[in-house]
Structures are given as structure tokens and as C-alpha cells.
Amino acid sequence: MARILYGVAGEGFGHSSRSELLGQRLINAGHTVLFAASRKSYSYLKPTFQDAVQPVYGLSFYCRNGRVYPMRTLWQNIAGYPKGAAANRRLFADSVEPFEPDLVISDFEPFSAWWAQRHRVPCVSIDHEHVLTCCELDGERALWKERLLAQIVTRGYHTFADAYLIPNFFKAPVTNAHAALTPPVVRNIVLNQRPESGEHVVMYATGADEKMRQRILDIAQSFRRHRFYVYGFNRDLERGNCVFKKTSTDGFIRDLASCRGVIATAGFSLISECLHFRKPMLLIPLQDQYEQLLNTFYVEKLGLGQRSDTLTGECVGSFLSNLDTPLKTHPLVEYPDNEKFFSIVDNTFKHIGFDLNLCGSSPKRALCRRSQIRA
């Protein structure tokens, strides 16, 4: 059996939910997994995997009112790095090195990937972000500066992986011989929820404040025939046709499965869940976050929803007027498929010398071939 260090980034819940699924599948196959998770991912994974989850200092975005602030992000990470780096040195010295991993998996978590490179341990990258560096993409030429910066950051996170697995909701030509696209995966709570067609619209706000709350209320009052369930403010409050709800995974998934449409930022995880339930989307990407800008471009291009730079009454009105229009079926759309994802992951690990038996019925002995690491 293999001993696997699994690094998980802490921005959003897409990294942690995907890592929970794969981590549990690895454990069920008989392997030993040690998670190094930061921030939200640590909080998400700790109750399930308990002592197998250790905190790692992670880089983060400074986000406010629907916008990522690059300079504030830079200084925030610089200010926290000395203390965080010291904590990470203790983590790797006290927990990771005695664990003696045969393999490292990184879900956009740079410190575990860099540790693997220094110690010549095979490493596989599994994240959506590497679509920016490993695939040929369409996009708006006016955003070339944002794309270039995003590519530089992504390469800096993880440069020397033995393989790159990229969950993605659209098909694109792969330009890296060591990379492969996979379908998105969704949480078991999503798979177990039956989709319905209700009367409400789900809104999810990221990095929102009181100013954004008032804007949502003002817009909602212009469309009194519709009912809005709003998440992201972690409070229970009802004003007319607008219902603000506290954070609740079960509640959110129930509302998502039964809604008429979704208005949200353009995170990959939420897009995947909307695709699973076949819900139309109005996406307002976090400004200066190129991954989200790219997601909105493809959602609109493939007929899966609409996009807008900012949340306005005009864009909401246009979206609501088209809710009854059936979603288009486009050959480039890759809908969530957990078993196909695990099959591709399993085959990729076999290619670098690890038979992890993720899709088999009984655990097999893992083969560790560190000599295959590329320089």
C-alpha cells in the first residue's frame, strides 16, 4: 500500500470537496493518506479525517465586494509568510518526513509540491487551475495581461509534477504531454439530491459586505414575482421577496437542486454543481481573477448561462426573462462524472508506477518507482 501526502489549497471549497472524495477513495483502497490543508480546506476536512489532517500555511486572495485586489493580495501574503513558513517547516519536519510519503498529490497546494520536488518524491497535480497552462484556450484578447499573470502564478505553484490532472467543464486541446483533462466531480451530497424545478432563484455572494447586501435587496425589489434565496452573508433575514440564509451545506444543496436558476460568482465547483442539476447560471466573476473570467467566457459560449461584469438590475432582468429557455446541448461541455474521473486518475497513477486500484474491488500493492521522476 502507498503512503500519500495530499496537499490541499484553502481558497473556496472546490479543492477540499474534491480532495475529500479522492482521499476517501484512496483510504478505501487500503492506502494511508496524510492531508496538509490550509484555511477553509483544513476546517472542511478535519471533522472527516481527524488526525490525518494537518494545518499547512497557505497563500490567499484578498477579496472584497466581488473583486480580487492584486496588490493587497501580494502584501497580505508577504506579511504572513515569515510566520507561515516557520509553521510549515515544523509541519514537514514533525509530521511529513516521519510519515515518509511514497507519493504526493497537490490540489493547488504549493508547499507540498515543492517538498516533493526537493525530496525527489513523485508528485501528481490535480486541480482546475492548470487548464491555464496545459491547454489551448479561447478567450478575450483584451484580457491577455490577466491571462499572462494567471499563467505565471499557476506555474509558480507547481512546475515539476509527474502528471497534471485537470478537472474541467469544457473540452479543450491539451498542450502538455504529461497532462489530461477529466470531468468535474461533485460531492456525494450533490449526487444524493434529486433535482427539481422550484420557484426560487439562488444567489451566492463572495466577499460581500453591507453595501452588496443592500444592492441585492434593491435589485430583488424590482422583480417581485420572483423569490431569491441569498447565501454568503451567514445570516437569517427576510425582506420582501429576498431571503438571506445562514451558511448550511445541506440547505444550500437543497435550494440549489430545486431552484429555477443561479446567480453567483464563477467558481469552478459551483459551476460543476449547476451543471449536474442542469441549472441556468448568471455569473458575475470576481474582477481581476482570470480563472473566473475564463469560466464565464466558456459558460456563455457554450450556452450554459449568461455573464455580467457587475450585478445590475439589467443583467438580472435579462436572466430572469430567459429562465424558461432550455439549456443548449453543446458537444464541448463536460458534465460531472465521478466514476470517469476516478478511472482517469487511476490510469494516470499506473502510468507513473502506482497501481492504486481506485476502481477495483480489492486493494493491491502499490508500486513505487521514484526513478521515474523527471528533472
Image (cartoon, rainbow, N blue to C red):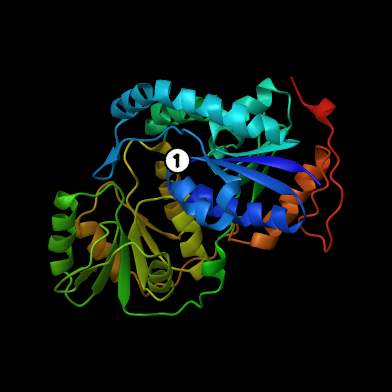
Q: Which amino acid does label 1 sit on?
A: Glu
Left or right, 181 with reference to 228 = right
Q: Mark 1 points at which residue?
A: 291
Q: In this view, does 305 lie above or below 372?
A: below
Q: Which part of the image, by quadrant, shows the C terminus?
A: top right
The one nearer the camera, 362 or 208, is 362
Q: Looking at the image, can residue 99 be seen?
A: yes
The foreground one among 338 and 187 is: 187
Q: What element carries label 1?
A: helix
Residue 194 spot, x, y in % from top left: 51, 78
Within 10 Å of the Cα at label 1, are there few (<14), some (14-19), or many (20+) other Cα atoms?
many
In the image, residue 280 lies at what x, y percent?
41, 65
- Residue located 29% across and 57% down the image: 232
Which residue is located at x 60 percent, y 59 percent? 331
Q: Residue at left 46%, top 34%?
A: 58
Q: In this view, does 319 lie to the left or right of 374?
A: left
The image quadrant of residue 236 is bottom left
| Image x and y of residue 174, in percent | 65, 39
Q: In this view, does 347 lie above or below 331?
A: above
